[in-house]
Image (cartoon, helix red, strand yellow):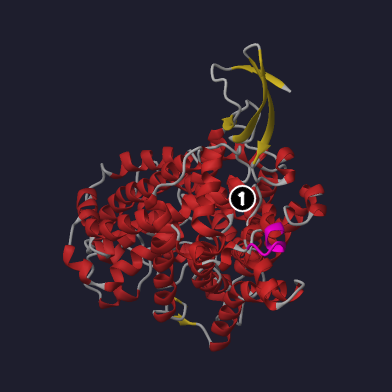
Amino acid sequence: MSKSRCSVALMSSVVATAKEANATGPKAVELVLVKEQNGMQLTNSTLLNPPQSPAQAQDRETWSKKADFLLSVIGFAVDLANVWRFPYLCYKNGGGAFLVPYLLFMVIAGMPLFYMELALGQFNREGAAGVWKICPILKGVGYTVILISLYIGFFYNVIIAWALHYLFSSFTTELPWTHCNHTWNSPRCSDARAPSSSPDPNDTFRTTPAAEYFERGVLHLHESQGIDDLGPPRWQLASCLVLVIVLLYFSLWKGVKTSGKVVWITATMPYVVLFALLLRGVTLPGAVDGIRAYLSVDFHRLCEASVWIDAAVQICFSLGVGLGVLIAFSSYNKFTNNCYRDAIITTSVNSLTSFSSGFVVFSFLGYMAQKHSVPIGDVAKDGPGLIFVIYPEALATLPLSSVWAVVFFVMLLTLGIDSAMGGMESVITGLIDEFQLLRRHRELFTLAIVLATFLLSLFCVTNGGIYVFTLLDHFAAGTSILFGVLMEVIGVAWFYGVWQFSDDIKQMTGQRPSLYWRLCWKFISPCFLLFVVVVSIATFRPPHYGGYIFPEWANALGWTIAASSMSVVPIYAAYKFCSLPGSSREKLAYAITPEKEHERVDRGEVRQFTLRHWLVV
């Protein structure tokens, strides 16, 4: 019993909202007035609708600081693709005009999906698989994104190993990709410092020292005839890969308490280096021409479907949705954290980083174009060729070239490592939340994951490893990611219900999402994703590396890898439906109803079987 002084002398019951210092969220408390005596009212209080967080959430690890979480999310979302992909797409698709579809898709799809994943993980406080207690039949979506993250780790860590190899090679007075006087060089090699205006018609068949260093000195690609002739792992790259795996393990083995400290370096260092490179780049001859080419506006390009497709695909991949990482990271937040503000901040930082990195990239590309007296288009490219061939070649021509090379590859190393940490954390969190035995032995399980990743990554550091890398990059992280995000947003907005999801967010933040966000989740984002999935399939082109065309069996293997992750969704759905008791109608009711509402299903109350559930926004 508790006492309260009240000026109203009516026998009544009221419902009030109470917030306690140690509570996990707003709580509804029913105060029932029992009797009034001498101006004093005696009441009885009952807690209504306690926050629906998991039982284990009370002892769940949380971020030491809010900044640890923000830096982890930014570090994951801002990765190598921000440097090698966005600037090239912007240049290729009409310069500044490309920002129109890019920003449009960011607002109607990128931000809503990012916000949805942060809220989903924070409310349920579990990894990518555990959150699907909101719709048990779609739990396979969680396992799909975990599997995709694992596949990505097989080849993404190799990029970091390449950067580490280049970093070690930069500690020398003369960079090894400056001249053609090395054992790995071929007769076709043309000195980068030689005049490029030679009238020799054979110039078109010559290669630069930087290109030969990457393909012959690092990859040893000339010793392989194709993907069916991989050869042994190169010990230099394998050693760098070991260092990457060790760094990943000790960043992740204790959970967010350790990874949250590592990102203070890995997430901030790239911005320091990008700023330094920008200051150096804009002082180079030809830099203005490069930046002008980057920003030149050609609105006529907006009439081409390919421009809009490139913008849509870039949004999906640049933010990192559909990999379970955002769900895993946000699951370690405090229950009352403002995930809406976090979504706005991190997506904005990601887009601004992509845009500003274009100034750095094209200032150097303009310099290289002027140096070789060729158009910008002849030196502008995306992918590994930009950061491991074109950029090193440009750095080799600068005074103090070794210093600038060290700075640049440190940036690549930090850009890659926190993104790799995010992918591994998605796998680890997603599985330890499902299997308590793994939770009790997180250190050993983390070791097992990174070792498995290392062993399979060895295929990518063989003589023909670049072919395995290209195949995985093309199939493991393409259509399957888009499919996973599409199923995710359908599961949350339609099966779980956008209204119920909004109630969850209100319980955490105290404010319901506006109509705009609810419309995006319910209609706009699913339509957008369906469009991108269909387009990605319709415009599919078999992978290739340079002039090498992959054999049919390699393409079949690639599609098998892609299908292996996507097929988990229907396989698990069939398993779940068949394993539930009762009639077909009862099975379906339990399969699509959140676990916390199963008691209502027992009473025959299934909101998913009502028209209002599907129409309400």
Which of the two residues, 460 or 482, is positioned nearer the viewer here?
A: 482
The residue sitting at the bottom extreme is 552
> Which quarter of the rendering shows the N terminus?
top right
Residue 325 in picture, x, y percent from top left = 58, 53
Residue 588 falls within the magenta-colored stretch: no
Residue 551 in picture, x, y percent from top left = 53, 86
Image-quadrant location for residue 212: bottom left
The residue sitting at the top extreme is 38
Helix, strand or loop at label 1? It is: helix
Which of the two residues, 439 or 207, is positioned nearer the viewer here?
A: 439
Q: Is residue 8 above or below residue 356?
A: above
Residue 528 in picture, x, y percent from top left = 39, 66
Residue 381 visible in rendering: no
Residue 454 in picture, x, y percent from top left = 68, 60
Which of the two residues, 510 or 223, is positioned nearer the viewer here?
A: 510
Horizontal arrangement in the rendering, residue 602 relative to residue 73 (left or right): right
Residue 50 visible in rendering: yes
The count of marks equals 1
Read off the magenta span. 599-605
Q: Residues within 10 Å of mark 1 (few under 14, many from 20)?
A: many
What residue do we see at 57% from left, 17% from top? 6
Which of the two residues, 59 or 373, is positioned nearer the viewer here?
A: 59
Horizontal arrangement in the rendering, residue 575 relative to residue 189 (left or right): right
Q: Which residue is mark 1?
A: 328
> Which quarter of the rendering shows the C terminus?
bottom left
Image-quadrant location for residue 602: bottom right
Q: Mark 1: which amino acid? A: Ala
Q: Is residue 168 above or below residue 566?
A: above
Residue 603 falls within the magenta-colored stretch: yes
Q: Is residue 530 above or below residue 343?
A: below
